[in-house]
Image (spheres, grey):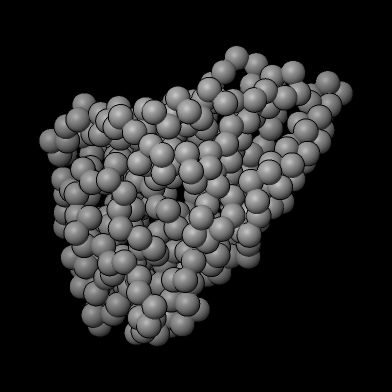
Amino acid sequence: MSSKQDIRRRLLEVVLDLASEGGSIAFLPHERFDPDAIGASISLAEVFRAIGCKTTVLTDAEPPALMSHLPLLETLQVFEPGLTCSSFDLALAIDCHETDRVGARAECLTQSRLRGSVDHHVISSDLGRLDFVVPSASSTCELAFEIIWDLELHLAKPLFNKDIAVLLLAGAITDTGRYAYSSTTPLAFRQAAFLLERFDVDLTTLHHELFDRTTVGRLQIKGDIFSRIVTIEGGRILVASVTCDMLERRGVTDNDLTNFASEMRAADGVEVAFLFIEMENPPGVRINIRSNGCFNAAKFAIQFGGGGHVRAAGVTLNNTALDEAKELILQEAKRHLDECMGELDS
């Protein structure tokens, strides 16, 4: 397998070639994008545009209200059926590397002249020559920073700016849990220091917008969900679920459930927490998984077509009822937990 430096160099060579001829690049953050996916997408799009490329960030939906504080959201374009994806010279999946993570926009990966990705999730599919996937990185924004840094050095001109600094910090802060997760790298701290030293970023306000800002409806749905938490396997597995009716009653969406599973994981004695979220359109269930100890959330999720990180992963089960999804997932979770606990005891 090529080293990450080789892949990054190949990707930069392609981008510089496209910049010299005014080539076009599409950025495809994963469905239900978060600050890491959108921060990396917009930052790379802005920098590649500044050096001569035509760039478009194609999303699956409008940004949720909780991200409205981030800069440059007006540059996003919501994907519409009928878009001519073959017009792009390069399509990059961002914060994912599997075609099924970008939904209908997958046709842009298959129809563009070149395709690649920038991602830090556990590898779950074959990689191509332009797939810059580094699971040891703490965030995709960390990788985006490296790309922009290389371009600054190569072109000998400043490419970072305050908006990009805010976007990269937002992605890094959220994906590292405020620099507290075990995946946090020394490089993430060095990058943050560089951005804060060069630009006047209001870190207090950014933290408030990302973690503290809320709504009455979100507080109410949190109470509804947490009051129904069920413990199994002697409290080692925590389970909660939310139905479409519950969301509608509180006037919130599933975007308002961010970090709920992480809070569940923090309970004493918990090895893994599952938050089951009923979906209406398309019908199915989305499962947020957060783990401690020996339970590998990514390895578990991959069994069901999902993915993520060792401590945070997700699964989507289409055309599956909520009770059916819980039975399927929890039965396997018990087996997975017994297996990993047994390995610790041996």
The residue lying toward the viewer, choosing from 75 and 275, is: 275
The quadrant where residue 125 appears:
bottom right
Q: Residue at x 39, y 63 (%)?
A: 60
The residue lying toward the viewer, choosing from 3 and 333, is: 333
Is residue 255 visible in the rendered image? The answer is no
Tell me if residue 60 comes above or below residue 210 in the rendering. Answer: below
Is residue 99 visible in the rendered image? The answer is yes
Where is residue 82? Give x, y as percent: 37, 83
Quadrant for the C terminus in the image: top right
Where is residue 337? Give x, y as percent: 76, 31
For this view, does 279 lie left or right of residue 78?
Answer: right
The residue lying toward the viewer, choosing from 213 and 191, is: 213
Where is residue 119? Give x, y as percent: 47, 54
Tell me if residue 294 comes above or below residue 17 in the rendering. Answer: above
Where is residue 259? Give x, y as percent: 44, 33
Q: Residue at x 65, y 16 (%)?
A: 269
For this view, does 177 lie left or right of residue 50?
Answer: right
Q: Residue at x 18, y 65 (%)?
A: 50
